[in-house]
Image (cartoon, coloured by chain):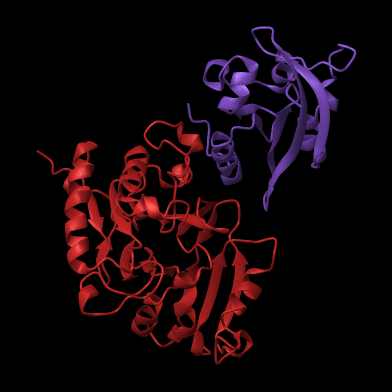
Chain colours: A purple, B red
């Protein structure tokens, strides 16, 4: 359902993610997860079309993430949260868990999506470390 | 709202015997609002003819620029009211973090590209970033929104009474999007165009030409029609013709567009190819006669 026009930069960010084989998430200015691409869906074990939009409390815990001690990474320390709240890039390394139970050690790089009207969201890219 | 098309061509002026009917001037559409307020949509070379047709005394014109590519500003330096001290021009356009609207336009109206400098124009001229919220010009409300093109680019919606015109001359909404299927909120320009009385929309390329121009910021015919089908304007004016498209080509293109539009469930009378000097009037539907 349409709930109002997305800012153009979010539309373009989604288009960009759609065409990448690098897993990526896109959240809007309120922190709502509005899209993740097929590569992210393959890693998480569920496509975005199946999972649907998620609020911050949901996407921040749905797939872990866990630190090197197996502890849940606090929401406010996630790169995507930092990018959105503080308007700056952020990077971290942690483990996420797919809906099928598979664990993936990844590095995550997030950056805010900003235009002349301000910050309209943030993107995060995941770099799987299994093969490195 | 009265409408007159002074330039329907994209990219570069294309005068010559093969473009006499659709015209060779670049983007410019004149609106005369219900109280007589004059608005120019873009200032391509078509605005030269518009300027010559305006009254000499006390002309006040709002010029809404979608973006600053040359085919949308080239006529500014040849717009007669700019050279009359009793004229007023208010120029609206997309903001940019790089420089003010005035400074960006002054790159064209300055040496070595121009014999005159902006400061030498005798008219009263001002420059305003198009706001992120709706604003008023005369009796109309105006809304601007960023749309998919190369560089900061706006589309406009002008609502005067119960009629509305949406103008998106440079637009590639189908880039990376399934226009027929994706949620409307992910389609560039959707809210701007939705249900407009008349939609001016980019249709620079045929479907056969488009593969060589993906990402150039313009629409192929099937995407322009799919966008219109989703946004449901009452009428569609296909605009920004490629400079290589001759009158004969555009006649045939119109036939193709009507056939494709019919396949999508549209009526032939809803669709038109913009041609220079074409005049239209948007008015309320007449009430049905009493029985």
Q: Which residue occupies the extreme front position in the image?
A: A131
Where the C terminus of chain B falls, by quadrant? top left
Q: Where's residue A64, x and y in %?
A: 76, 14
Q: Which residue occupies the extreme top position in the image?
A: A101
- In this rendering, would A61 be left or right of B170? right
Q: Total marks drawn? A: 0
> Can the viewer see residue B271?
yes
- In this rendering, would A114 be left or right of B45? right
> Can the viewer see residue B165?
no
> Relative to A121, is B10 above or below?
below
Q: Where's residue B76, x and y in %?
A: 48, 79
- In this rendering, would B57 be left or right of A57? left
Q: Where's residue B160, x and y in %?
A: 40, 56
Residue A109 figure quarter: top right
Q: Where's residue B168, x and y in %?
A: 42, 55
> Relative to B50, is A85 above or below?
above
| Residue lying at 25% horizontally and 80% vertically, measured from the top left | B16
């Amino acid at each position: 359902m349409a709930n109002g026009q997305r800012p153009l930069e979010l539309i373009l960010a989604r288009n960009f993610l759609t065409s990448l084989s690098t897993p990526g998430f896109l959240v809007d200015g309120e922190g709502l997860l509005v899209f993740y691409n097929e590569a992210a869906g393959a890693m998480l074990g569920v496509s975005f079309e199946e999972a649907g939009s998620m609020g911050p409390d949901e996407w921040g815990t749905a797939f872990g993430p866990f630190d090197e001690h197996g502890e849940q990474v606090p929401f406010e320390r996630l790169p995507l949260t930092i990018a959105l709240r503080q308007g700056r890039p952020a990077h971290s390394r942690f483990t996420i868990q797919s809906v099928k139970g598979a664990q993936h050690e990844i590095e995550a790089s997030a950056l805010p999506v900003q235009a002349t009207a301000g910050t309209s969201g943030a993107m995060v890219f995941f770099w799987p470390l299994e093969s490195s | 709202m009265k409408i007159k098309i002074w330039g329907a061509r994209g990219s570069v002026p294309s005068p010559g015997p093969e473009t006499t009917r659709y015209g060779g001037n670049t983007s410019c559409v004149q609106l005369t609002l219900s109280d007589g307020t004059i608005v120019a949509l873009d200032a391509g070379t078509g605005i030269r003819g518009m300027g010559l047709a305006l009254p000499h005394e006390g002309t006040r014109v709002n010029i809404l620029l979608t973006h600053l590519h040359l085919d949308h500003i080239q006529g500014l330096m040849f717009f007669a009211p700019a050279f009359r001290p009793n004229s007023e021009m208010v120029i609206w356009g997309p903001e940019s973090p790089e420089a003010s609207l005035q400074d960006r336009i002054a790159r064209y109206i300055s040496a070595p590209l121009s014999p005159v400098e902006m400061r030498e124009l005798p008219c009263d001229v001002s420059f305003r970033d198009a706001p992120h919220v709706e604003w008023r010009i005369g009796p109309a409300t105006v809304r601007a929104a960023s749309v998919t093109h190369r560089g900061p680019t706006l589309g406009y919606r002008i609502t005067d009474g119960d009629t509305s015109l949406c103008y998106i001359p440079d637009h590639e909404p189908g880039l990376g999007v399934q226009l027929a299927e994706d949620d409307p909120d992910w389609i560039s320009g959707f809210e701007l165009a939705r249900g407009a009385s008349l939609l001016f929309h980019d249709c620079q390329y045929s479907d056969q030409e488009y593969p060589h121009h993906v990402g150039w910021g313009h629409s192929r015919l099937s995407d322009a029609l799919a966008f219109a089908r989703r946004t449901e304007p009452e009428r569609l004016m296909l605009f920004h013709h490629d400079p290589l498209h001759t009158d004969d080509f555009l006649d045939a293109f119109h036939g193709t567009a009507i056939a494709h539009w019919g396949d999508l469930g549209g009526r032939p009378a809803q669709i038109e190819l913009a041609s220079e000097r074409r005049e239209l009037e948007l008015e309320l539907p007449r009430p049905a006669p009493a029985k």
